[in-house]
Amino acid sequence: MTNSTILLRYERPSALSFIGYALGLALIAWCLAGAGFSVEKMVTAPPRFADFLDRAFPPNMDPKTLNRLGWKMIETLQIAVAGAVIGVILSIPVALLAARGLIAGVWVNQIVRNILSFIRAVPDIAWALVFVVAVGLGPFAGMLAIAIDTVGFCGRFFADDMEGTDKGPAESLTATGARKLDVVACATIPAAMPAFISTGLFALEKAVRSSTILGLVGAGGIGIELKVGFDLFDYPTAMTVILMIAVVVVALEQLSGWARNKIIGEQR
C-alpha cells in the first residue's frame, strides 16, 4: 500500500461533512441522555443481575407448576398459529390491492400501502390493548392482535413478491383476452407462492415471539405468568417461563428455517 493510497483513504473531510459528523455525534449524545444512560448504573448492574440469577436458579420444576405453565404455553401457540393463519389469508386480497399494476389503480395502491404502513407502525402489544378494550380480556384479543399485525407484515411483502414475479406468463394470458383476476389467479399468485410461503413462515415466527408477551396486557398466553412471577418476586418460576419461551421459539425457528430451505431447494 503506497503513501498516496493511505492519504486518499484518510482524506480530510470537507467542512460540510465535518458538520454532518458533528451533528451525528450530538444526536447520539442527545439520545443517550434521553435514554438515561448512566455509567454508574452499568457498573452496578452486573452484581444485581448476578443476584437475580442466584435467586432464579434452579428454575421451578414443580410438576403442578410445569403443568400450569405448559397449558399456558400451548395457549400461546394457539394464539400465534390462529392469528398468523388468519392474517396470512387476509393478506392476500389486501396485497392484491397494494401491488402496482395488477387489479387496482395507482391511488388504491397508495392508500392500501399507507394503511399497511400504519398497521406496521403500531406495536403488536398496542393492538392487543385495543382489542382487549374491544372484545375483553383473554386469548381472543391476542389472536386478533396477531392477525392484524400479520396483515401489516405480510400484506406489504406479498405485494412486493407479486410485483417481482416474471411478467411473461401474465402477459401471455393477457394477450389471449384473459381478465385481470384470471391473470392474477393463474399466473401471478402461483409464481409468487414460494415467496408467500417463506414470508408466511417468517410471520409465524414473529407471531410466536409476539404472543409470548401479549399476556402482559391481558391478551392471553404465557406472558401473564411471567408478569406474575416478577411481581411476586417468584424468580424461579419466572426463569422457568423464560426458558420455556426460549426453547419453543428456538425450536420453531429451526423448523421454519428447515422448511424455507426445502422450499428454496425445490424451487431451484
Image (cartoon, rainbow, N blue to C red):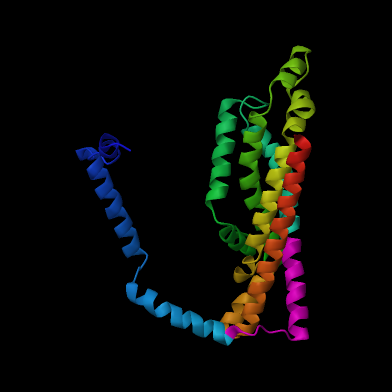
- Whether residue 170 is visible to the viewer of this picture, yes or no, is yes
Q: Is residue 12 left or right of residue 114?
A: left
Q: Quadrant of the N terminus?
A: top left
Q: Is residue 77 left or right of residue 127?
A: right
**Vertical order, 68 against 221 (above or below):** below
User: Residue 261 in the image: x percent, y percent?
Assistant: 73, 45
At x 54%, y 46%, the residue is 118
At x 62%, y 34%, the residue is 160
205 vs 214, nearest the viewer: 205
User: Residue 259 in the image: x percent, y percent?
Assistant: 76, 49
144 vs 211, nearest the viewer: 211
At x 63%, y 60%, the residue is 210
Q: Main secondary structure of the magenta part?
A: helix
- Whether residue 137 is visible to the viewer of this picture, yes or no, is no
Q: Quadrant of the C terminus?
A: top right
159 vs 261, nearest the viewer: 261
Q: Residue 226 is drawn in which quadrant? A: bottom right
User: Residue 117 in the image: x percent, y percent?
Assistant: 54, 44
At x 39%, y 80%, the residue is 44
**Magenta-drawn stretch contains 264:** no
Question: Which residues fall within the magenta stretch?
Answer: 56-79
Q: Residue furthest front?
A: 2
**Vertical order, 4 against 40 (above or below):** above
User: Residue 138 in the image: x percent, y percent?
Assistant: 70, 68
Q: Residue 14 is drawn in which quadrant? A: top left
